[in-house]
Amino acid sequence: MKIQPSVRYSHTLLSQFLQNGDTAIDATVGKGNDTEFLSQLVGEKGKVYGFDVQEEAIKYTNQRLDDKNLSKNVTLFNTGHENIDQLVDGSINAAIFNLGYLPGSNKDIITKPDTTLTAIKACLNKLEGNGIVVLVLYYGHAGGPLEKNAVIEYAKSLDQKEFSVMQYQFINQVNCPPILLAIQKNSN
Amino acid sequence: MKIQPSVRYSHTLLSQFLQNGDTAIDATVGKGNDTEFLSQLVGEKGKVYGFDVQEEAIKYTNQRLDDKNLSKNVTLFNTGHENIDQLVDGSINAAIFNLGYLPGSNKDIITKPDTTLTAIKACLNKLEGNGIVVLVLYYGHAGGPLEKNAVIEYAKSLDQKEFSVMQYQFINQVNCPPILLAIQKNSN
């Protein structure tokens, strides 16, 4: 048994904090890994919203969810996650972001600090007490360190009365393994 | 439900990686919290070795374990953890260190980088494959940042072919909450 890598630990956290009937956002759908996982966690009474700028990601994920009969509680938007605030009504219990590029895919299509921070802020504003926003930061590409640093600096600046920010990472590896951040809204 | 603080997460990791019959070291016994936890995890067929320079810590913990009928699998040494290599024979499956000062106790009695690193190296040398050394770093005291930095730099320098080093910490809190490091020996 191994200490969980960041991507796997992101799912461990989501499964600890999401319950049947909850609402969640997959801010970076990609191949739909997280969307599928969230759909199963929140169940038929729950709701998942997914965002991706790439049309093929949305098509691929729609098909994937259909094949597994999981599409009923999912709404996918073929647009950037900076539009979360306009497109998602009400509060959420969790959100997940995979930031950087889609592993195994086109490294030219990457997330960018401005839109990423807009999306993170929208999710934090919508969070219920004890809800979490989980961020998996890939940064081994051009532009990666810039985005990683912007996101970590923003997360560090969050008021500890309102949020708890946890960082999880492997620190002795040469190839920039992803860093996990988890931002939890304190309950009152 | 809250994201686990570092101290609590150290126990989560130990409970994931230790099994009945295993051998573990508590390198900083203090009031015996971790010693008791390890004793329960490894069970009657297992073995726990504890170290503390303070005689009262050893007395207190011996009494605590006796009261709970947990002393049979524990051997406590009233000496510094730099003597682990001489006093513990054979391999181990886990070790835990609480570094800095004992919370709620005398802040003048602190662990020091030299002896700390000697002890960590001894534990790493004794680790079985997939075994872990868990370090909880308190550093909000004089000398704390020096020790914390020495330990983190050492952990970062470990060869990723031999060990995986994970760091877990809260990053938006003003009062230096402890940092958790987990060093796992890779299996071959």
Image (cartoon, coloured by chain):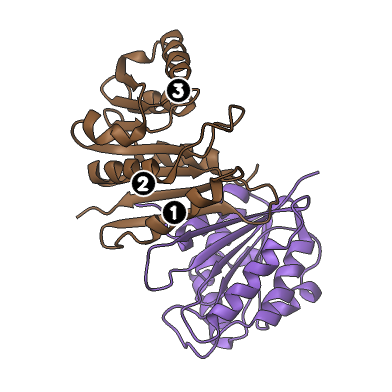
Chain colours: A purple, B brown
The disc at residue B150 is 1
What secondary structure is marked by label 1?
Answer: helix
- Considering only vertical position in the picture, is A133 above or below B128? below
Looking at numbered disc 3 in the image, what kind of residue is underneath it? Gln
Camera-nearest residue between A133 and B51: B51
Q: Is residue B107 left or right of residue A115?
A: left
Q: Is residue A28 visible?
A: no
Q: Give me the chain letter of mark 3.
A: B
Which quarter of the picture shows residue A104?
bottom left
Instruction: Tell me which residue sits at (39%, 60%) in the image.
Output: B156
Indicate left or right for B160 with B169 as reference.
Answer: left
The crowd level at tag 2 (other Cα within 10 Å; few <14, some 14-19, many 20+) is: some
Within 10 Å of the Cα at label 1, are there few (<14), some (14-19), or many (20+) other Cα atoms? some
Q: Chain of mark 2?
A: B
Q: Which percent across, then down, holds residue A61?
A: 53, 76
Q: Are marks 3 and 2 on the same chain?
A: yes
Mark-to-mark CA distance, 1 and 2: 8 Å
User: Could you give the CA–CA distance between mark 3 and mark 2, rounded to whole angstroms?
Assistant: 19 Å
Which of marks 2 and 3 precedes in the sequence? 3
The amino acid type of the residue labelled 2 equals Leu
- Residue projecting furthest to the bottom: A108
Instruction: Kindly indicate whether the residue at mark 3 contacts the one at mark 1 (C-beta within 8 angstroms).
Output: no
Residue pointed to by mark 2: B117
Residue sitting at 57 percent across and 47 percent down? A16
Query: Is the Cβ of the residue at disc 1 closer than 8 Å to that at disc 2?
Result: yes
* Quarter of the C terminus of chain A within the rendering: top right
Judging by the rendered image, the residue that carries numbered circle 3 is: B54
